[in-house]
Image: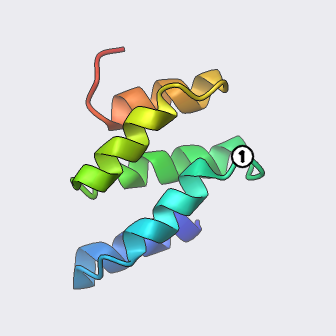
Amino acid sequence: MQAVIATSIYELTKDSSMESIVTSVATARNREWVHRLDAIHCLGRFKTDTAAKVLSELTEDPDYLVSYNAKIAGGKPK
């Protein structure tokens, strides 16, 4: 939920600091996978080089669902 709210704030205000919040949720291995997946798809909405880099790195995550969703959010083929 934190990532969704941060993404909404970014879309309304263009506050670039929201990207770091979403990134921290997407990359946190101690979070439940469902929260990470939400954050991954939110991160894909930022369309920045930083977001693209994080999504690319997440495609190598050992958790299959995280890896797969990072590919989808990053616009890479399945």
Residue 15 picture quarter: bottom left
Q: Residue at x 45, y 68 (%)?
A: 20
45 relative position to 5: left or right: left
Quarter holding residue 53: top left
> In the figure, 6 relative to 63: above or below?
below
User: Is residue 61 placed above or below 32 in the rendered structure?
Assistant: above
Which quadrant of the rendered structure holds the C terminus? top left
Residue drawn at x 28%, y 23% as measured from the top left:
76
In the image: residue 30, left or right of residue 74: right
Left or right: where 63 falls relative to 72 = right
**Colouring scheme applied when the structure was drawn:** rainbow
The crowd level at tag 1 (other Cα within 10 Å; few <14, some 14-19, many 20+) is few
Q: Amino acid at mark 1?
A: Arg
Picture coordinates of residue 61, whole percent (x, y): 59, 29
User: In the depicted view, which residue is nearer to us: 34 or 50?
Assistant: 50
- Looking at the image, which is closer to me, 4 or 25? 25
Q: Quadrant of residue 13?
A: bottom left
Quadrant of image for the N terminus: bottom right
Position above or below: 26 against 1: above
Locate residue 75, reporting x and y percent.
26, 30
Q: Which residue is mark 1?
A: 29
**Residue beneath the point at 47% across and 27% down:** 59
Query: In x, y percent, where is residue 32?
Result: 74, 48
Dot 1: element: loop
